[in-house]
Image: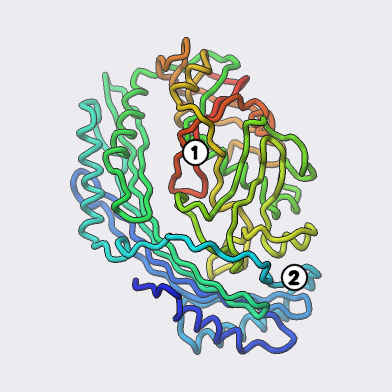
Amino acid sequence: MSAQPDGAELLALAERVVALAAGDEQVEAVVVRDLGTEIKVYEGEIESLSSAQSQGIGIRVIKGGRQGFAYAGTLDVDVAAETLAEARDNAGFGTVDEFAGLAEPDGVAPAELPLWSDALASFPAARKVALALELERAVRGADPRISGIESAEYVDSMSEAAIVTTTGIRAYSRDTGCYVSTYAMAEQDGEVQTGFGFSVGRDPAELDVDRAATDAAERATRMLGATKPRSERLTVVLDPWVTAQFLGILAFTLNGESVLKGRSLFADRLGEEVASPLVTLVDDPTDIRAFTATEIDGEGLATRRNVLIDGGRLERFVHNAYTARRAGTVSTGSAVRGFKSTPGVGCMATSLVPGSQGQAELVRLAGEGVLVQEVAGLHSGVNPVSGDFSTGAEGLRIRGGELAEPVREFTIASTLQKMLRDVVAVGDDLQWLPMPAAGVSVVITDVTVSGA
């Protein structure tokens, strides 16, 4: 993949389509090109290697309040013209919607972010394989109790997108990203435990294979001998990996589409205190540390730092152009899409503003409780409307402010609302993961821990 720094080829195709718009219609052309590699290794051999490229154009036509959409998986000019005709035809079958319309320039200039790495674009497959094998070797050598590797992989992506509309938007962005991740298996006295480790970067030079291996081995070995804890209400310290998963759920409840459809527990609560004063939640796709950082959203508007909860007060939902119109507000540059779909809306890079204490200090603060290092089935265990959640978990008991015996096969349960209010400390150990959220250690009081 040889992306042009200015996206001239993709922009030219999008402009060519938009130039065919009739006077009484809005036309949007989204041209995307992606290339990704995924390599899995097992016992010193390549288990699977896939390298996939996708490219295409998605076209929206809006006329008389009716929207039509069509896409094609090619950059062929003639096919693009046929796709435009198909989108026009589809618009004729659309339902009239007074809020239908394309995004319009809002005066916010896209940030110029160093999201593209030529080093990754030219990184040979053989060295990608070598990284995955190095990861597997490092995990096996990290501790004599490591008995096997459940997974060890290298993944990367290179993406570029151009968006042009009849409303005056002309935007282009490109980015690269890669990560290594592994699940290690530790065995002792016939008992097997697993642990996760990862490292994320913009290019392979930023990947820390040793750290990923060490984290996975430590998480697996420290769970050996785990027992089921007794049921009680305890203070919990969420590991950054766990916090990131909760933020993913929370982000869903804060997008404009969920609010408009009555699927958010925070609907009608703008301006209210919904969390501890220690909680400031932002969605910032311009943070270059985020694996999902991008300069433009799915409608070509500049991405920006949106403060969703500020010191515990609910300040904002994220919107694309459509949900913003329906809600009587403006887009937050939060449209999400590929070329095969119309724009949705969602958070792209969510994180808590870190505190000033490390995890060890937070454990001392907790005194008695549980460090939760893994949860299972969280997405199916949370009701985004009521906020109720119950999820399987494992981790380490905290006694006298120190990490103690491992515990597993228990559930933690509360509501998202109560959990946000009961945050008593936020750590300084912000970690970006290969997902649209970052994690940080968080201390939460009065959580129901159900075990034996």
Q: Percent from the top left, x then y, of residue 365?
A: 52, 17
Colour scheme employed for the rendering of this structure:
rainbow
Quickly name the residue at label 1: 439
Which element is circle 1 on? strand
Q: Percent from the top left, x then y, of residue 419?
A: 64, 29
Q: Image quadrant of residue 129?
A: bottom left
Measuring 54% from the left and 81% from the top, which residue is drawn there?
A: 14
Q: Image quadrant of residue 386?
A: top right
Which element is circle 2 on? loop
Q: Image quadrant of residue 171?
A: bottom right
Q: Percent from the top left, x then y, of residue 272?
A: 77, 38
Disc 1 versus disc 2: distance between alpha carbons?
36 Å
For this rendering, which residue is in front, 139 or 285? 285
Quickly name the residue at label 2: 100
Q: Is residue 186 above or below residue 244?
A: above
Three-letter amino acid code of the residue under disc 2: Ala
Measuring 64% from the left and 47% from the top, which residue is drawn there?
A: 307
For this rendering, which residue is in front, 223 or 115? 115
Three-letter amino acid code of the residue under disc 1: Gly
Quarter of the picture containing the N terminus is bottom left
Q: Earlier in the sequence, mark 1 or mark 2?
A: 2
Measuring 53% from the left and 62% from the top, which residue is drawn there?
A: 111
Q: Is residue 366 above or below residue 218?
A: above
Q: Which mark lies nearer to you, 1 or 2?
A: 1
- Mark 2 nearby-residue class (10 Å; few <14, some 14–19, many ≥20): some
Query: Mark number for residue 406?
Result: none
Q: Is residue 263 left or right of residue 78?
A: right
